[in-house]
Image: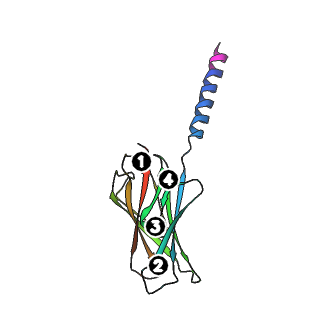
Amino acid sequence: MKKRIYLKFLLIVFLGLCWVNGQAQTLHQLVLTVDMTKPNSAPNSSFSAGNNTTVVENSSPNRFAIWAEVGDSVLWEAKSAGEAQVPVNVVGVNYVGGPRIFSSNTLTGSNSVKATIIRGGKEDYVYRLQYTIGTDTKVYAVTALIKTKK
């Protein structure tokens, strides 16, 4: 009798672990590529996302939007395009509007920024990605969106 109860308990634990593992959250890797071919003008930039990320809109850097769910993580990185491979560093992600889906309004980093979505909302989360180019201290910014499921 005790053996049956023990086996049922183990089966429930095993099924629970399988279910939790099946609900694994996604890492959304977002890469800002900065065109360095026009050094004397404001940098042209474009976003791209990893294969596991649904891009909703990508008509311009300021109209870039992805789908994400609560529990997912977002990793923002940047790189340069063109012959001169100048380092591009993501220094911050700042809240602009919509529901606050991260634990803080300002997320900081030195080369990249990573955060986990803690809540969703009906409206789009609007953020400003800030970055620097090479050793220049000037901070550039692009605005983008994250759509979440409530």
- Choose the circle earlier in sequence order: 4 or 3: 3
Tell me the kind of residue under disc 3.
Ser
Q: Residue at x 49, y 84 (%)?
A: 38
Question: Are dots 1 and 4 in contact, CB under 8 Å?
Answer: no
Q: Quadrant of residue 50?
A: bottom right
Residue 33 in the image: above or below residue 27: below
Q: Quadrant of the N terminus?
A: top right
Q: Residue furthest front?
A: 59
Residue 73, labelled with which disc? 4
Q: Amino acid at mark 2?
A: Ile
Q: Quadrant of residue 7?
A: top right
Q: Kindly report the distance in space between the C-alpha atoms of the residues bearing marks 4 and 3.
A: 23 Å
Q: Which residue is mark 1?
A: 118
- Mark 4 and 3 residues: CB-CB less than 8 Å, in contact? no
Along the line of sight, the residue nearer the viewer: 141 or 59: 59
Percent position (x, y) of residue 26? Answer: 54, 50
Sequence-wise, the earlier of marks 1 and 4 is 4
The residues bearing labels 1 and 4 have C-alpha atoms spaced at a distance of: 9 Å
Highlighted range, magenta: 1-6
Label placed on residue 106: none
Quickly name the residue at label 3.
60
Looking at the rendered structure, the kind of residue marked 4 is: Ser
Q: Is residue 134 above or below residue 112?
A: below
At 66% from the left and 16% from the top, the residue drawn is: 4
Label 4: which secondary element: strand
The residue to which callout 2 is attached is 133
Which amino acid type is marked by label 1?
Ile
Which is nearer the N-term, disc 3 or disc 1?
3
